[in-house]
Amino acid sequence: MARPTARRSRHLLIATASALTFFATISGCVAMATEDPGTTGTPGTGRGGDDGKGRGGASSPAGPGGGASTPPARVSAEISHESEDPGKTVNLTIDDGPEPGWTVKVLDLLAKYDAKATFCIIGSRAQEYPDLVKKVVAAGHRLCNHSVDHNTAMDKRPESYQERQVLEARTMIEKAAGPGVRVYYYRAPGGAFTPYSRDVAASHGMRPLGWSVDTHDWRNPGVGHIVDAVKKGMKEGPVVLFHDGGGNRGQTVAALEQLLPWFKEQGYAFAYPKT
């Protein structure tokens, strides 16, 4: 009876080892299947664009600067109309560029008067003129996302369309700007914000940006009209809307030539909108 008992024991030991190996294999597969896919980022969606230190980065894991990206810090989804600095300030915002000729003229004037501004850039224009975006960044100004192609009726379009307009433009602007450049704000074309588009922007680190003073310079109403609109409108708030794209901006440049020294004479400090 001793031999059959030993044989049965060996069979039991082999069966037990096989079962343990089987269950270990199954556990490993389950662990792999349930791993969080979001930890690696998603190319082309704008996820993971901020490195968590106040700098924007690539929208995909292998973007500028190399290495995997991390989710951006969320900001407020409320539309900003205030300055981030206390006191008597003006926040110059320049929309619809970059535009060959006009963007450089605006940059030259800002440098002449030691003024800073926020450039609200159209994604497709950034893609077309990346060197101009780099000039804006090199001059020390901030960037704002102004959608892919400036559809002023985007608030009437589906949420999927709005999301693409916000996130794809951000990717285009960041690629044009270069590694480590943050896009601070999102301004809907024509002010066509929706609660959804504001939330998408805010969740990707871009504060929705409004304006306090609309110069209507895009209509070319005359240099005097633009200058008067600013001087009379400053009581409404610090965020002033100009344009460097969308057409002939000669009147804007001429108006800025008058307004930039006027701001200094009136005791305004140049600042950025609140993030």
Image: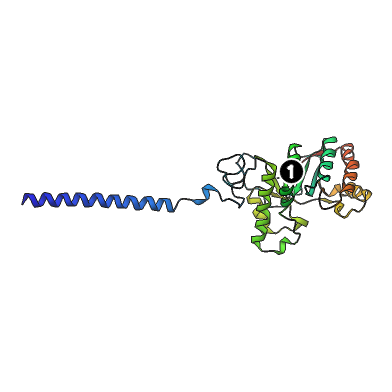
Is residue 68 found left or right of 217 in the rendered image? left
How packed mark 1 is, by other alpha carbons closer than 10 Å (few <14, some 14-19, many 20 or more), is many
In terms of depth relative to the viewer, which is nearer, 234 or 270? Answer: 270
Residue 25: x and y in percent read 34, 51
Q: Residue lying furthest left in this view?
A: 1
Q: Classify residue 10 as left or right of residue 169.
A: left
Q: Residue at x 62, y 41 (%)?
A: 64
Residue 211 position, x and y percent, is 79, 51
Q: Which residue is mark 1?
A: 133
The image quadrant that residue 113 belongs to is top right
- Is residue 113 visible in this depiction of the protein? no
Q: Residue at x 29, y 49 (%)?
A: 21
Q: Residue most toward the front?
A: 128
Quadrant of the drawing holding the C terminus: top right
Locate residue 237 relative to residue 11 in the image: left or right: right
Q: Position of residue 74 (x, y in %)?
A: 63, 48
How has the structure been colored for display?
rainbow
Which amino acid, mark 1? Val
| Residue 65 appears in view | yes
Q: Is residue 12 left or right of residue 257?
A: left
Count all numbered tags in the image, as a single digit. Answer: 1
Q: Position of residue 148 (x, y in %)?
A: 71, 54
Is 140 rendered above or below residue 145?
above
Q: Secondary structure at mark 1?
A: helix
